[in-house]
Image: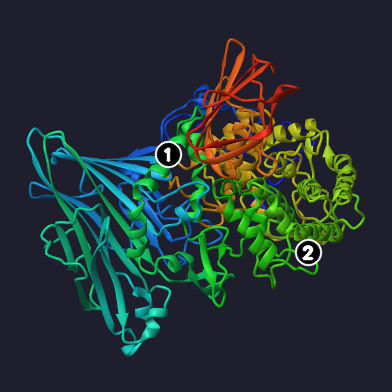
């Protein structure tokens, strides 16, 4: 910090009397900074907090948040799906392609934009996360679009062609409605790519379906044409780099008629075969789904817009093709002609697809830190048309199942904002954050995941262990990553060390990454049906746990020593509260797995360490006066950096993690709750801008006027060590959604529902479409993976606990338990859980909508106003023979011979 910043570095954020004196008075600061109550507003239409008087701001983070009653009510209100119109459409970019098939956005006005299919790294893909403060407006490097012709007038299907355009979120689907006084036909676009939880492969198509429903609002019949166009972009960049004859070739367009699809496919061929081994060599296809053949076909279009697409000839024959000089722009178009009677609606579905066989994916930092691999999807479908042809064969099934998930997810009693914000960040796997590749020379594919889009490679352990969503929606991906990445490419089989980036080399270990990965193995095992996965990986997991003990806790007293590299990008020293707690959580998880692998002596060893370490952590690091855990740094001057006596966001991270795997907390509950209350009091601010006027270092992921939970506050005076890097110290001043969501989830689990929801709602408010892209939670670059910690908040709201191999499922809703409905996933199926209370008696139903579910035990928390009691349980109306018992306020139901459900079946439980 500069001298001016230093003068505020000890500014207190509470009414504590132990705060060091300020050279400049706080109220003088308020006057100097121009801070007003108007700055303490979040949300673009409603005041979130205030009004604040000068004395309220004696702390740069006010202890009394003064949240408005309307804003508090919005935390619980069902609300409506996110929608936008007018100028608020410009930032919207919803990833709309299959898992690890590139990155294409659906824009707010229905255009497809961004188009990063070859993993190109742009200037904003950097650790600064520039798109938070400087979001992109919709723009496309690819000439592609759709248009409507009615009565000789052409209306492009975007905000230029229609005056009234409204976008409505149903991620992973979306709708865009078009209307214009000058057009007698309205249009509704429903856009999607197959997205079926638990079915990774059927959710990985390099295909986008654009389903347009046209409705004649006039009293007379209307002749209508709808068409789309697509650009041939093969070798666009590599041809510019090539010299002489190397780039000489042709752009080729081919017309194909398939069983339930018609396509025009664009590609390129060269005299120099090496040009076809470039990462941007590709094929692009535009198709129309259905058996009817298009009346409009254009194979030699040369303009990047709607010109000419409605005068194209329908005389194309199967296999007909055209060739154009490679240097010339080349497009293809396809369309249908319809006649709509008054009030009639008809649908036309287009498929946009691509195939980039090769990809340069990130394996290191810097512009040369890439490796050449083969896209997995390209080994299944060698051309763009092949991919859309495969989808077309099963489009109804894929659409219906995707729609069933969307309906299941959003048909809930939980607020829309919460459902959206706790699910949307999983869209990172639909971006160039990750690639599913066969590395060069390998016949085994891997998921190469960076932290954010094309930034910070190597499936970083100390970031990815925060993410909870992917493991519940596509658990096979996380299982494969544990086996192939952390316990494969990044694993030292001799020592048990795990590189925090799988490339190894200069990327050593991170203790939080190691411990978080061990916890992830238990989570992944619980999302399977038996112990085969755990058995296959257990020896490696045990070796890694033993390595952590040997390296950082050789005395086995449960306290850490030495350099402890972590997610804040440098080693901390001494006794670090959050790392110790996470270490203990890993030991507890390892003990559970050891018993499952019939190694009780190993489990007992791990448990003994926790039994020593947990009370030692409390004795040494709990500060009763402060009301939270502190970090006691090392003795040397070079070891003094860290959160020290500050209130750190992750101080009870380990206990938060344990809720995700159904293990009881380690620390005393009163200390956990006091720590969480301290985070609310000292770290949650209705206006991050006021805090950052004082704490100036750090990146901006929450701006002036935004509310957020800051990484670390210093209500008892800030210690400024000479050690550590200033840029890393700046992390402590930031708001990063993955960390915030972790705390939000923990608060909800611990019964602090309103505070936990408020943290999540503040994030939702920051990502309103009028200010930035609601589909891109930014940290270190775009679509940051840690943001998937949000799903942990969803699990907490449901009180969801699941252990597949043990056949155990449990629910205990934290929000409106008297009337609750929400989606859930298990190892092999997903569906909807429902809970209601009437006359002091509780009723629960499990409706399975996909796959199958095997249970040996079902546990249900009693809602307020009920108590555990006699149980009656039926499956599709048939009485089941069960055993039940009361475990405090919880009813535990045993199925003596197991219970199997199939999709479409309903389990009903009445008790109390």
Mark 1 neighbour class, 10 Å CA radius: few under 14, some 14 to 19, many 20 or more:
some
Residue 23: tell me if it is visible: no
Left or right, 18 with respect to 483, comes to right
Residue 532 in the image: state x and y as whole percent: 69, 54
**In front: 271, or 629?**
271
Q: Which residue is mark 2?
A: 496
Residue 16 in the image: state x and y as whole percent: 76, 32
Left or right, 654 with respect to 394, comes to right
**In front: 400, or 366?**
400
For marks 1 and 2, give the CA distance.
Answer: 43 Å
| x 30%, y 55%: residue | 351
Point out the image quarter for the N terminus: bottom right
Q: Which residue is mark 1?
A: 404
Residue 175 in the image: state x and y as whole percent: 33, 42
| x 78%, y 45%: residue | 592
Q: Colour mode?
A: rainbow
User: Residue extending furthest bottom?
Assistant: 244
Residue 872: tell me if it is visible: yes
Left or right, 599 with respect to 784, comes to right
Point out the image quarter for the C terminus: top right
Disc 1 versus disc 2: nearer the observer: 1
**Element type at marker 1?**
helix
Residue 300 in the image: state x and y as whole percent: 18, 70
Could you tell which of marks 1 and 2 lies nearer the N-terminus?
1
Q: Is residue 441 above or below residue 650?
A: below
Based on the displayed image, in which of its 4 quarters is residue 256 positioned?
bottom left
**In front: 94, or 173?**
173
Left or right, 39 with respect to 488, comes to left
């Amino acid at each position: 910090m500069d001298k001016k910043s230093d003068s505020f570095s000890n500014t207190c954020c509470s009414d504590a009397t132990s705060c060091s004196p300020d050279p400049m008075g706080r109220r003088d600061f308020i006057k100097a900074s121009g801070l007003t109550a108007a700055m303490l507003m979040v949300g673009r239409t409603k005041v979130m907090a205030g009004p604040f008087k000068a004395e309220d701001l004696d702390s740069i983070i006010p202890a009394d948040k003064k949240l408005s009653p309307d804003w508090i009510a919005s935390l619980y209100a069902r609300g409506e799906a996110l929608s936008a119109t007018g100028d608020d459409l410009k930032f919207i970019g919803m990833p709309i392609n299959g898992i690890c098939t590139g990155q294409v956005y659906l824009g707010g006005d229905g255009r497809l934009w961004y188009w990063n299919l070859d993993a190109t790294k742009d200037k904003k893909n950097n650790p600064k996360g520039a798109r938070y403060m400087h979001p992109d407006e919709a723009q496309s490097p690819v000439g592609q679009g759709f248009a409507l012709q009615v009565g000789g007038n052409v209306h492009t299907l975007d905000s230029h062609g229609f005056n009234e355009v409204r976008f409505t979120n149903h991620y992973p689907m979306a709708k865009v409605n078009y209307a214009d006084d000058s057009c007698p036909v309205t249009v509704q676009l429903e856009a999607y790519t197959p997205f079926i939880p638990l079915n990774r492969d059927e959710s990985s198509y390099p295909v986008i379906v654009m389903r347009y429903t046209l409705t004649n609002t006039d009293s007379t019949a209307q002749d209508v044409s709808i068409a789309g166009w697509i650009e041939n972009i093969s070798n666009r960049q590599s041809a510019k780099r090539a010299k002489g004859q190397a780039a000489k070739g042709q752009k080729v367009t081919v017309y194909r008629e398939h069983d339930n699809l018609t396509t025009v496919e664009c590609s390129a061929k060269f005299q120099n075969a090496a040009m076809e081994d470039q990462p941007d060599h590709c094929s692009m296809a535009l198709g129309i789904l259905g058996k009817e053949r298009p009346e409009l076909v254009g194979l030699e279009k040369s303009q990047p817009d709607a010109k000419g697409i409605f005068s194209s000839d329908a005389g194309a024959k199967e296999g007909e093709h055209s060739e154009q000089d490679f240097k010339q722009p080349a497009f293809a178009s396809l369309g249908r002609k319809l006649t709509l009677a008054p009030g009639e609606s008809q649908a036309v579905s287009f498929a946009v697809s691509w195939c980039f066989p090769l990809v340069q994916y990130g394996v290191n930092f810097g512009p040369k830190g890439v490796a050449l691999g083969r896209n997995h999807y390209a080994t299944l479908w060698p051309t763009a048309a092949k991919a859309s042809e495969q989808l077309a064969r099963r489009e109804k099934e894929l659409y219906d199942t995707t729609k069933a998930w969307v309906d299941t997810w959003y048909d809930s009693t939980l607020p829309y904002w919460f459902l959206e914000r706790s699910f949307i960040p999983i869209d990172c796997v639909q971006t160039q954050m990750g690639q599913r590749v066969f590395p060069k020379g390998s016949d085994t594919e891997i998921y190469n995941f960076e932290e954010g889009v094309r930034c910070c490679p190597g499936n970083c352990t100390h970031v990815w262990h925060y993410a909870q969503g992917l493991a519940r929606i596509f658990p096979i991906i996380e299982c494969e990553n544990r086996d192939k990445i952390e316990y494969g490419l990044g694993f030292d089989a001799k020592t048990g060390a795990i590189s925090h980036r799988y490339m190894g080399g200069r990327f050593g270990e991170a203790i939080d990454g190691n411990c978080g990965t061990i916890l992830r193995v238990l989570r992944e095992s619980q999302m399977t049906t038996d112990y085969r996965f755990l058995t296959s990986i257990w020896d490696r997991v045990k070796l890694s746990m033993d390595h952590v003990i040997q390296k950082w806790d050789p005395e086995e007293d449960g306290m850490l020593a030495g350099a402890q590299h972590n997610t804040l990008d440098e080693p901390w020293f001494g006794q670090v509260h959050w790392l110790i707690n996470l270490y203990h959580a890993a030991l507890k998880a390892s003990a559970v797995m050891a018993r499952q692998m019939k190694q009780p002596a190993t489990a007992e060893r791990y448990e003994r360490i926790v039994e020593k370490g947990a009370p030692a952590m409390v004795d040494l690091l709990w500060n009763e006066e402060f009301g939270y855990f502190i970090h006691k740094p090392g003795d040397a001057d070079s070891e003094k950096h860290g959160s020290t006596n500050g209130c750190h966001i992750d101080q009870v991270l380990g206990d938060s993690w344990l809720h995700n795997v159904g293990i009881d907390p380690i620390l005393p509950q009163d200390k956990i709750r006091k720590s969480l209350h301290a985070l609310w009091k000292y770290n949650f601010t209705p206006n991050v801008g006021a805090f950052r006027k004082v704490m100036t270092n750090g990146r901006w992921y929450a701006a002036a006027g935004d509310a957020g939970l800051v990484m670390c506050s210093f209500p008892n005076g800030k210690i400024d060590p000479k050690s550590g890097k200033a840029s890393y110290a700046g992390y402590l001043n930031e708001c990063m959604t993955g960390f915030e969501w972790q705390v939000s989830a923990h608060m909800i689990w611990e019964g602090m529902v309103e505070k936990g929801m408020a943290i999540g709602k503040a994030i939702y408010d920051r990502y309103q479409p009028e200010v930035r892209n609601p589909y891109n939670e930014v940290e270190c670059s775009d679509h940051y993976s840690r943001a998937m910690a949000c799903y942990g908040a969803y699990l907490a709201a449901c009180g969801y606990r699941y252990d597949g191999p043990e056949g155990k499922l449990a629910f205990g809703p934290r929000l409106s338990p008297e009337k609750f409905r929400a989606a859930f996933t298990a190892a092999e199926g997903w569906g909807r859980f429902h809970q209601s209370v009437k006359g002091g008696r509780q009723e629960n139903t499990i409706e399975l909508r996909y796959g199958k579910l095997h249970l040996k035990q079902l546990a249900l928390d009693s809602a307020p106003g009920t108590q555990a009691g006699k149980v009656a349980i039926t499956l599709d109306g048939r009485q089941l023979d069960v055993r039940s018992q009361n475990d405090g306020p919880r009813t535990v139901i045993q199925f003596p011979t197991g219970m199997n459900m199939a999709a479409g079946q309903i389990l009903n439980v009445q008790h109390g």
